[in-house]
Image (spheres, helix red, strand yellow):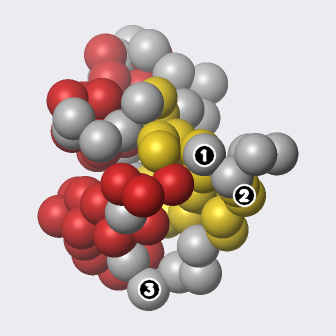
Amino acid sequence: MTESHPEQDETLLQFPCRFPIKAMGRTEAGIETILIEIIERHAPESSRQPLRSRPSRNGNWVSVTVEIEAHSKGQLDAIYRELSAHAQITCAF
């Protein structure tokens, strides 16, 4: 009989894997710093990965992406919960 792992059954990802985390917010909000701090708490080995920033056409908004080494769905869920709860983050995906 095959052993079932509910956490693994809920995702198509195979862990560990490289996974991009993207957050958006107002340019002046310091999204880069916020994203780094959150990643350091949940994936410390990935916090030194280079960030990719992309400003909006008018420069009012910025999206920031960092690629992490994800080890579980729970880890990704925790990162997204914290990003989504942060007042300066407009959206995370």
**Residue 5 in view in this figure:** yes
Judge from the rendering whether residue 32 lies leftward or rightward of residue 52; answer left or right: left
Which residue lies under the disc numbered 1?
Answer: 60
Q: Nearer the viewer, mark 3 or mark 2?
A: 2
Q: Residue at x 44, y 86 (%)?
A: 48
Which residue lies under the disc numbered 3?
Answer: 48
For the residue labelled by badge 2, is the local secondary structure a helix, a strand or a loop?
A: strand
Q: Residue at x 36, y 54 (%)?
A: 29
Q: Residue at x 82, y 45 (%)?
A: 57
Q: Going from the N terminus, do you reach mark 3 or mark 2 first?
A: 3
Judge from the rendering whether residue 8 lies leftward or rightward of residue 41; answer left or right: right
Q: Which numbered dot is residue 54?
A: 2
Q: Amino acid at mark 1?
A: Asn
For the residue labelled by badge 1, is the local secondary structure a helix, a strand or a loop?
A: loop
Q: Amino acid at mark 2?
A: Arg
Tell whether label 1 touches label 3 (CB within 8 Å): no
Residue 81 vs 11, above or below: the answer is below
Quadrant of the rendering where the N terminus is positioned: top left
Q: Position of residue 77 (x, y in %)?
A: 31, 32
Tell me the CA gap for discs 3 and 2: 19 Å
